[in-house]
Image (cartoon, rainbow, N blue to C red):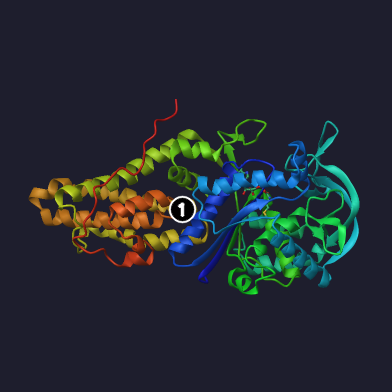
Amino acid sequence: MTSTSYITTPIYYVNDKPHIGHAYTSLAADVLARWRRLQGHEVFFLTGTDEHGQKVEKAAADAGMDPQSFTDRVSQHFRDLTGTMGLSNDAFIRTTEARHKRACQALWEKLASNGEIYLGHYEGWYAVRDEAFYGPDELTERDGVKYAPSGAPVEWVREPSYFFRLSAWQDRLLAYYEANPDFILPASRRNEVIAFVKSGLGDLSISRTSFTWGVKVPGDEAHVMYVWLDALTNYITAVGYPDDPAAFAKWWPAELHFVGKDIVRFHAIYWPAFLMAAGLPVQHRVFAHGWWTNEGQKISKSLGNVIDPVALVEEFDLDAVRYFLLREVPFGQDGDFSRSALVNRLNGELANALGNLANRTLSLIQRNCEATLPAPAETAPGDVALRALVAALPATVGGHLDRQEYHLALEAVMALAREANGYITVEAPWALKKTAPVRMAVVLRHLHDTLRALATVLQPFMPDTMAKLLAQLGVPEEARGLDHLATPLPAGLALPAPEPLFRKVEAAA
Ligand code: ME8
């Protein structure tokens, strides 16, 4: 692993407002970006908006606006989402920026000069909603209308089009997947992609003439680029392609493109093929996560059950929402959003297991140790299990996060919190003040060290709350990295009076 890390979210379409699905992908990317920073890596974390294409052109027309003003307005909602979700993105890209158009045209010219593009005719089934072509065998028909597997209606399109020689890359893509077993995660998605590529790749239509809202094809301005070629290129625009070779060399290839399972094909087939064909390195990984439903139902505007991240964060607090989304569902699998599950996690794990542990430990130190940190202590037999978990925690969590197993990382955190709660119950430090004050101090010090480890590794998940906890634990701001855990805090450190970290919530009526 290099010490630079470039992490991306999809760039979201500006035909709609952000919802929980967008917040989820961005959150997963944010947690990894924050974890890498905690490890001491230099990080570039990118999100943004995908603003071209027929779908946006139509949405703007429906709103009675010109496409640029329309995208200016809707893109702002996604910029606001970064604040709502507490994202630590280093940049926000929009595909309508001039630098991005230059990057698309530079990539196009490179592909053309490498002989990867030719002019032909496109004829086939196109779904505007997905901005994707489908084969006849993929379609279903209802009431005389044909539908893509995504449920989007398709229409027959015939127009001149430039093609990318995707078919020529089939074997090289398969060889690449073979040589890089973790290129596509989770494994179920990797198998799906491999099966799709093995079933045969046709050449890809990469320009359109039937609308104009896009990046013009260099040398043939009747054509605009296929929106996915335009959109995928954002990942290299943002790190300096083609104008800033030094920045590009520093950040590219990306460590990880986070996407939902709906767009894995574009990121794991087309994008590496474009990159290889242009002689550029391929990203290290694509992680395609699963789909959220709401109380068992598909989330859709027509069902009126879209979950608004702003409302959710207002009701439950940001860090509880961040924790819940990554804790509840194994990352990669589909998941169901339920209020009662959120309330259970918040009350049971955050307020009770973690919050009470912190509050009990810190209150005892306040009362019984003159509000100062007891000395580091030798490990007695009863302390062994706890100390072992504390020592292993950063590597355990790090190992899971290297594979984007957020749920397992959080399970490891909770296992330690449970162990510590068991320890405090068995050792009962509140009963030791008179009978065994030395042992009491030892027990409280072990608990304090445990909380410090928990709070340190939880920072990427719950940045604000863990900053509060670390302050209550007396850990200076500049000593909150993973490496600092190896250095014990000095005995005698003055500790502030603890305050509750989490707000319990009543189960919904
Ligand atoms: O596809 N559950 O943009 P998009 C989980 N512009 N994740 C969900 C979700 C749900 N119910 N709904 C949406 C595009 N998502 C293109 C991307 S990238 C070069 C171009 C998330 O606005 C998930 O990450 O339709 C999905 O892949 C993404 O939003 C689609 O966002």
Residue type at the position of mark 1: Leu
Mark 1 residue crowding within 10 angstroms, few (<14) / some (14–19) / many (20+): many
Q: Identify the residue shown where x is 46% and y is 63%.
A: 37
**In the picture, which quadrant includes the C terminus?**
top left
Q: Nearer the viewer, residue 14 or 486?
A: 14
Q: Is residue 369 above or below residue 4?
A: above
Q: Identify the residue shown where x is 82% and y is 50%.
A: 212
Callout 1: SS: helix
Quadrant housing residue 346: top left
Tell me how many marks there are.
Answer: 1
Q: Is residue 481 above or below residue 125?
A: below
Q: Which residue is mark 1?
A: 408
Q: Nearer the viewer, residue 375 or 497?
A: 497
Quadrant housing residue 91: bottom right
Q: Residue 262: where, in percent of width, then height?
A: 67, 48
Q: Residue 247: where, in percent of width, then height?
A: 60, 71
User: In the shown orientation, is residue 26 left or right of residue 377?
Assistant: right
User: In the shown orientation, is residue 241 left or right of residue 335?
Assistant: right
Q: Residue 390: where, in percent of width, then height?
A: 32, 59
Quadrant housing residue 455: bottom left
Q: Residue 73: where, in percent of width, then height?
A: 65, 44
Farthest residue, direction top: 509
Q: Does ligand 1 reach within 8 Å of label 1's beta carbon?
A: no
Asked whether residue 265 appears in the rendered view, the answer is yes
Asked whether residue 332 appears in the rendered view, the answer is no
